[in-house]
Amino acid sequence: MTEAPSVCVHPPVRHGDLRDLAIGDGDTVVIIDGLYHQTPALRHKEILAAMGRGVSVVGAASIGALRAAELQPFGMAGVGAVFRAYMDGEIDGDDEVAVGQEPGGRQRALTWPLVNLRHVLRIARAEGVADARTCTGLLESLRAVYYPQRSTAAVLAVLRREGAAHLGEWLRERRVGDPYFGDLKRLDALQAISAAVSGAFPPALGRVPAGVWDTGYHRRWVNETVTEDIDALTLAAADRLAYQQLFDPGFPGRWTAFLEHRSRHPGGAEGPGRPLAERLARLAGDDDGVPPVYAVFRPVLDLTDRQTVGLLLAGETAADRATIARYAARNAEAARAHPGFRPEAVVDAAARGVLLQLWQTGPESLDGEALSRGLGSGQHAVEALKTFLMGFLVDARAARLVEVADAR
């Protein structure tokens, strides 16, 4: 099937993949497997957004079947036995299709998903290898094994422990004759690809209206996928902006200038343009005093808009970009040295302490300082700093060592 010229095979889908600009109006995307443990899973609104721009989406076998069952009312098509099991309520969780995968580029499944074990036990019952009561008990015992540990060896060990060693021998023999025996997910995946190529799946209900998926969360996710190749580096626009917001002492002035620009040139259906002072005066009315502009206007940024990015990154330097890349490398090194390390897991108090020193402010002024930089709140600023904290601390320590050496 993959030899068909109209079929392009990609690795398991992850959060952000459907933003690929190569996927356009009239294309069909078949979602089968996806990543979710080690990376954010594909969100529902990402699928709806793709459908909103004219992409037909079919789901089967794994996370594709689950998402299709959840989004069928919006026009996502589902194919196969796993999809039907979700629709019928026979299964209802992502643990049913979860597998441990081989690291690296092959993405080969190393463990058994429950849907495949259900299928095997159903065949065993039909062939008289085990009765219904035995199969029910075995399924519950197999479910109790954590999915990354549910290898073939673990499955056979459970069967022996539960007095069903003969079922293990039967399974081993069937797999010798057919290495794909019991792989229901594979059967569903092939069926879904065939259906997509032939156009046999149910037709979509039309483009999903933007009001269904165009939320603040979705805009933030889109912003996270915007990258640019510059200075021989591939950098995320969101990281570049966050670095300026956190580390550039002059950014509050740039943020105010950006708000002034947005106020005078709102665009879309936001109404006529007018100076910020006029807007603030209208909001204040007869009240004494006018609040800071950054405390009143908090626009949702669109980092796909080059003008917005240009205005906000006007003070960025090549050294800033090199620092961002270096900090990202520090995070990668930490993750290799300490499996499970994630910048976002840094303790809030540690990041907050560094931020207060960096901005030379007190805890009572943290929210105001963050707002003046377009960061929303002090907590948002703390979360943003975590991405850069490891590299920043390494640089700070190196700088102190240099100072000590010079003093000597």
Image (cartoon, helix red, strand yellow):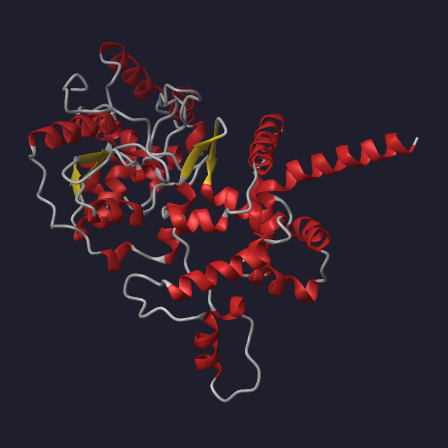
Q: Nearer the viewer, residue 272 or 382?
A: 272
Q: Looking at the image, which residue sits at the far right?
A: 408
Residue under the point 90% across and 34% down? 407
Q: Quadrant of residue 144?
A: top left
Q: In this image, 111 relative to 65: left or right?
A: right
Q: Is residue 393 above or below residue 177?
A: below
Q: Quadrant of residue 93?
A: top left
**Percent position (x, y) of residue 384?**
56, 49
**Percent position (x, y) of residue 167?**
30, 21
**Percent position (x, y) of residue 61?**
24, 33
Q: In this image, 398 relative to 240: left or right?
A: right
Q: In this image, 203 relative to 104: left or right?
A: left
Q: Is residue 353 above or below residue 112?
A: below
Q: Quadrant of the C terminus?
A: top right
Q: Quadrant of the N terminus?
A: top left
The answer, for residue 375, to whether it is visible in the render is no
Residue under the point 87% across and 31% down? 406
